[in-house]
């Protein structure tokens, strides 16, 4: 009799806290989540940030505009080229510089290749997070080809620094066009392989369908952007609404899904691989001749005023907000990072689910922690 | 909506009580048969609009009217600013303040709302997290780096820095001999 009572007591439901991170593999970096759970059901997710905060915004206030570009690829290191482009576009628009078409086209091609590389890595770790280790090697195999192309043209594989205010650091490598074409032909045969391996896998679908649902209204209210917003049917592609560089010269579809769950966000990114390939294909044979950089002053001074530029990185909308007082440094520079806003919706998406679902949800948020911590 | 139409509509929500008085005075002077003294045009609204030096329509609002203005910007079907895409704290030297960048996903127009205070010891604004949920995180970031407090915020504490951190790093008068390299 005594035994039965203790047994019943031990099954009493009780809320308690556990730590996830900062070294948990599913947090993809140093993010610590404080979970309040009841059994295995999540009651609250509270992110604890700042493990790698470097205060890039404060550093920018003492740096010149050329130097700021180099800091940006330490934010979202998987979209480094697009981050660089965001600052360069802000500076160029403020100075009203006329940028050669060649620069615009090359920037767009490399930007889309960056997006493909980022999605390849995401796809690899997405599979790994839900227990399919093979995907990691597939994703990295294809991403490696893009990194090799980048290495040949700009000398770096990850933190590229290929953009400078006024254009590009140097011209593209003579092999660039051929290697990109080879990659496009290669990768077209690989996306169906991705689908067969993971998308159509019934275990994967059961892990992701109906998990971490975010409605369209909530998506807008939480300010999410990129594939996370588009998975909820929220049309938010900056490339469509505020086209920059050569994106107004190409045709592509905005990848949209309406379910708002983990599987929908997964599908958006797979669709985006096809769309990015299509953009690269449209531009790669049509790189105009011309200068790869226009001359700027050695010391760039922006006119007095406020400048805002948004671009679509692999994670969503990156905003650069510069307040200038007319000196060679920005008075205030704010990066509106996509990961930060996307993370703010995590609690809303995870509450009521299980810990395993939280891992799957976080995988499709595609968080890059330096982007959040800046 | 165009910026002009937005300015007229939003300005009409907060009429300036001073504007009517000035008009009355001018009429009285005109009755005396003297030429009316040319006066500076009085802003018919309590809000200050500006487009100079920015690609967006800027509106400056006093802290008292901030939450009311923000609620109306979101709720009004003609403005319908449902997307707060950037919330930045700014230290203007003597003043501290917040800059809100808003966009409407239905009409695709933008507005920038600014609010400022000269109180550097205890700057406080109303929180807008009940209007846009994303503001909860962004306001915590501003509190962390600028020391600006928000009324009615559900969880106002340091976000990136440790709770015992001294000072607010993104303020212009912040000094840190160890962590800052001054050129």
Image (spheres, rainbow, N blue to C red):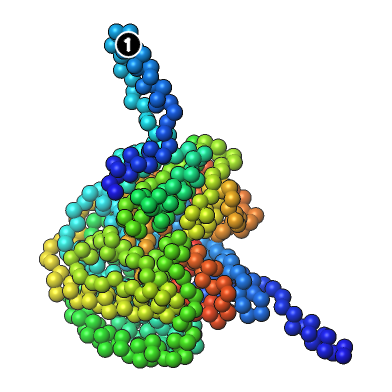
Q: Position of residue A217 (x, y in %)?
A: 43, 64
In the image, residue A268 lies at what x, y percent?
A: 35, 76
For residue A279, above or below residue A103 = below
Q: Is residue A182 left or right of residue B61?
A: left
Can you give x and y, in whole percent of width and height, for residue A133 in the image?
46, 89
Quarter of the rendering occupied by the N terminus of chain A:
bottom right
Is A230 or B13 nearer to us in this picture? B13
Q: Nearer the viewer, residue B98 or A292?
A: B98
- The quarter of the displayed image where residue A154 is located: bottom left
Chain letter behind tag 1: B
Q: Give me the residue at 44% from left, 91% from top.
A: A202
The residue that label 1 is drawn on is: B31
Q: Residue at x 55, y 39 (%)?
A: B120
Q: Check disc 1 and report its element: helix, strand or loop.
A: helix
Above or below — where is B97 with respect to A369? Answer: above
**x 51%, y 71%: residue:** A349
Q: Nearer the viewer, residue A185 or A81?
A: A185
Quick one: label 1, few (<14), some, or many (20+) residues within 10 Å? few
Instruction: Examine the image and state in which quarter residue A351 appears.
Output: bottom right
Image quadrant in which you'd find residue A337: bottom left
> Which residue is rendered at x = 25% and y = 48% of the image?
A95
How far across and down, in percent of the image, does residue A126 sit? Answer: 44, 81
């Amino acid at each position: 009799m005594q035994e039965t009572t203790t047994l019943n007591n031990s099954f009493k439901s009780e809320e308690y806290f556990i730590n996830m991170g900062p070294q948990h593999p599913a947090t993809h970096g140093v993010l610590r989540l404080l979970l309040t759970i009841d059994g295995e059901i999540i009651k609250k997710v509270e992110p604890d940030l700042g493990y790698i905060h470097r205060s890039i915004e404060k550093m920018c206030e003492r740096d010149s505009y050329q130097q700021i570009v180099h800091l940006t690829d330490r934010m979202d290191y998987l979209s480094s080229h697009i981050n660089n482009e965001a600052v360069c576009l802000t500076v160029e628009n403020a100075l009203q510089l006329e940028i050669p078409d060649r620069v615009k086209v090359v920037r767009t091609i490399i930007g889309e290749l960056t997006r493909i590389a980022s999605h390849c890595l995401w796809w690899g770790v997405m599979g790994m997070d839900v227990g399919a280790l093979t995907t990691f090697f597939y994703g990295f195999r294809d991403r490696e080809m893009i990194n090799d192309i980048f290495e040949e043209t700009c000398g770096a594989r990850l933190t590229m620094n290929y953009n400078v205010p006024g254009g590009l650091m140097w011209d593209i490598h003579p092999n660039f066009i051929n290697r990109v074409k080879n990659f496009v032909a290669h990768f077209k045969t690989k996306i169906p392989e991705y689908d067969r391996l993971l998308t159509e896998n019934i275990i994967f679908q059961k892990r992701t369908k109906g998990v971490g649902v975010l409605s369209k209204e909530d998506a807008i209210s939480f300010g999410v952007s990129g594939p996370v917003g588009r998975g909820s049917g929220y049309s938010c592609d900056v490339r469509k609404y505020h086209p920059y560089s050569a994106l107004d010269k190409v045709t592509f579809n905005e990848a949209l899904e309406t379910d708002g769950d983990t599987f929908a966000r997964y599908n958006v990114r797979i669709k985006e691989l096809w769309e990015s390939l299509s953009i690269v294909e449209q531009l790669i044979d049509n790189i105009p001749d011309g200068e790869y950089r226009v001359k700027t002053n050695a010391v760039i001074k922006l006119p007095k005023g406020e400048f805002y530029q948004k671009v679509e990185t692999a994670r969503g909308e990156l905003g650069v907000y510069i307040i200038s007082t007319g000196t060679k440094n920005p008075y205030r520079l704010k990066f509106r990072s996509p990961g930060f806003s996307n993370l703010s919706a995590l609690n809303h998406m995870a509450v009521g689910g299980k810990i395993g679902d939280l891992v799957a949800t976080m995988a499709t948020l595609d968080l890059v922690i330096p982007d959040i911590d800046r | 909506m165009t910026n002009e139409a937005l300015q007229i509509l939003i300005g009409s929500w907060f009429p300036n009580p001073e504007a009517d008085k000035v008009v009355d005075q001018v009429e009285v002077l005109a009755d005396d048969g003297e030429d009316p003294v040319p006066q500076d045009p009085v802003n018919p609204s309590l809000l200050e609009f500006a487009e100079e030096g920015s690609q967006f329509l800027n509106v400056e609002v006093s802290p008292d009217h901030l939450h009311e203005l923000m609620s109306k910007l979101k709720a009004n079907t003609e403005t319908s600013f449902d997307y707060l895409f950037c919330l930045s704290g700014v230290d203007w030297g003597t003043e501290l303040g917040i800059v809100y960048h808003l966009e409407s996903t239905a009409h695709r127009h933008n507005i920038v709302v600014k609010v400022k205070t000269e109180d550097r010891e205890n700057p406080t604004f109303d929180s807008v997290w009940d209007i846009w949920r994303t503001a909860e995180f962004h306001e915590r970031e501003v509190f962390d780096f600028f020391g600006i407090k928000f009324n009615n915020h559900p969880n106002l504490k340091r976000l990136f820095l440790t709770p015992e951190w001294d000072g607010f790093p993104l303020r212009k008068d912040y000094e840190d001999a160890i962590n800052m390299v001054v050129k």
